[in-house]
Amino acid sequence: MKKRLLSIVLGVAMTTGLLAGCGSSSDGAATSTASLAAEAATSTVEETSTPAEADSVGEANPGDIDTGDGEGKVFNIQAWNEEFKSRIEDHLPGYQKVSATEGKIGDVTVKWTITPSDDNAYQNNLDTVLPENENASADDKVDLFLMEADYALKYVNSDVTMSVKDLGITDDQIADQYQYTKDIVTDSDGNLKGLSWQACSAGLIYNRDIAKEVLGSDDPETVQAAVKDWDSYNATAKKLKDAGYFITSSVNDSYRVYSNNVSGPWVQDNKVVIDPNIKKWVDDSKALVDAGETNTYELWSDDWNKGFFPEGKVFCYFGPAWLINFSMQADQEGSVANQGKWGLCEGPQGFYWGGSWIAAATGTDNPTLAKNIMLTMTTDKDVLKDIAVKDSDCVNSKTVLSDLANDSSFKNEILGGQNPYKQLAAGAEKVDMSNISDYDQGCNEEFQNAMKNYFDGNGSYEDALAQFKTAITEKYPDITMD
């Protein structure tokens, strides 16, 4: 997921239940901050989930993780930041932290290798160690590694990852997880190759003051009616412009919503295909820009950030809970977030943004421990609820999200005291990632880059498309354009 962390200092007094996470921190700072802030909320959230059954982690009892008889005594985990390590340290039953890079589970030593993603260093490291893993010495074998959605299929569609079925994980054990979180890490033969503790469903984050002025109410149901589909959204953009506001900071804010709802993958029969929903993003965005209803700023740029403050005059951003809590400058006096004046609704279409997936490496000499860690961290409802409350992750459990959505004590002060889990749980039900492909990251990035000149009036759509075609054929010589 995006490694941008523009605001992480959220005081305990700011919130009684932060909702965020989903891998937004590259250095673990967000995790520790969220944990401190959410600590105050723990006592206010009623414990409604029942203890997980012993078989929720296979043979292991949730309070006693099975390390596997006769298996390796060193368990190696590869990740790009501290997030998963902090989740293990804080929530895995029986885990003992030894140092910043080591821990113990029973008599097994857990070793962490953290390689930042900058300049593709993390993937380059995986590309070096995973192909040789079966031949590596016992103490050097990679047992688990973490993946992001943008490049997951690179490893999922290879023999360096084990299927969860081969680990002994059954469909029944992961039935409570959202299907799209499985689709993202399912190979071309239908084998599930990873699990995530995160759902990272997202919605439309709106400025409550602007909603009251232009729409007459800042109630989530009222705002949702005004943006329930793209026609309604575009009509509302005109109302906002007439009142002196932009509907979004940039056309790029909405791109992920459109691209998550395509009817087919980017590459079909070895050819790149522009999906109708991607073309609709182009047409809708061009109309909005030409009408002065939005801009063409790059995400995370200083201009894009201006809407985090009232003077930026931006009505909404699209994003998950981690964007709300860690990226909208809630610690800055005068920001909309600092004043608790954002709200959340589902928006025109369901989508997700972010997340981390746990995969077992082919060649692991600790398959039992790998299995039980994956199951405990992604299916044990007590563990998941604890993660949601203390670490602010939007967790990958329909049951836990539903429980939190119906818990009136769970509030987010950045959202004016709203409990956003109602919207996040509803949005998660609408996400469909069955059309994900190995080419998504490159195609999405190059397509947005190419369209900027067209949106800015510096060329035609055909010119922009030609630029995209050139970039894609250079990036992926094995495919052709439709």
Image: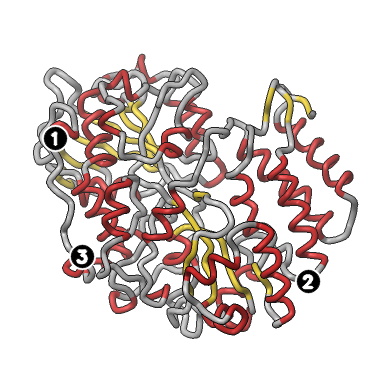
Relative to 359, 353 lies left or right = right
Label 3 Cα neighbours within 10 Å, binned few <14 / some 14-19 / many ≥20: some
Q: Which residue is mark 3?
A: 45
Q: Nearer the viewer, residue 87 or 124?
A: 87
Residue at left offset 46%, top offset 84%: 333
Label 2 sits on a secondary structure element that is loop
Q: Which residue is mark 1?
A: 65
Q: Earlier in the sequence, mark 2 or mark 3?
A: 3
Q: Position of residue 187 (x, y in %)?
A: 48, 24
Q: Nearer the viewer, residue 407 or 148?
A: 407
Q: Could you say which disc has been placed on residue 476 in the image?
A: none
Rendered view: 39 above or below 211: above
**Where, by quadrant of the figure, is residue 338 drawn?**
bottom left
- Asked if marks 2 and 3 touch (Cβ < 8 Å), the reply is no
Amino acid type at circle 1 is: Ile
Give the number of the mark in front: 1 or 2: 2
Residue at left offset 59%, top offset 51%: 257
Q: Position of residue 455 (x, y in %)?
A: 81, 58
Residue at left offset 52%, top offset 51%: 350
Amino acid type at circle 3 is: Val
Q: Which residue is mark 2?
A: 292
Q: Position of residue 310 (x, y in %)?
A: 58, 82
Label 1 Cα neighbours within 10 Å, binned few <14 / some 14-19 / many ≥20: many
